[in-house]
Amino acid sequence: MNFKELLLRAQAGDQRAQEKLLSLYQPLLMKESVVNGLFDEDVYQELCVTLLTCIRRFQI
């Protein structure tokens, strides 16, 4: 499945597609969740929610 198809499925509410996109972006999300040298789980969760919101709103 290519990225566009994965994105369209995620936008349609396919939970597996959303999980796959989260896993694709997990390294970046984890990197950006480090605050003062420590991993902040709250920041990570907020970034995940923000990514899913962006996926839903993205227009192809």
Image (tube, rainbow, N blue to C red):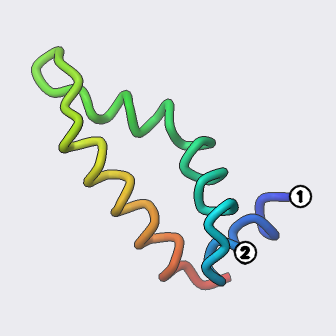
Whether 3 is drawn above or below 45: the answer is below
Q: Nearer the viewer, residue 37 or 40?
A: 40
- Residue 40: give x, y in percent of width and height: 19, 31
Residue placed furthest toward the front: 15
Question: Residue 30, which numbered label?
Answer: none
For image coordinates 72% across by 74% down, the residue present is 9
The amino acid type found where label 2 is placed reads Arg
**Which quarter shows the N terminus?**
bottom right
- Residue 50: give x, y in percent of width and height: 34, 63
- Residue 58: give x, y in percent of width and height: 54, 78
Question: Residue 1, which numbered label?
Answer: 1
Secondary structure state at the residue bearing disc 1: loop
Q: Would you say the residues marked 1 and 2 are in contact, meaning their CB atoms lie under 8 Å apart?
A: yes
Question: Circle 2 sits on which residue?
Answer: 9
Q: How many marks?
A: 2
- Residue 25: give x, y in percent of width and height: 54, 43
Q: Quadrant of residue 43?
A: top left
The amino acid type found where label 1 is placed reads Met
Mark 1: give few (<14), some (14-19) or many (20+) Cα within 10 Å.
few
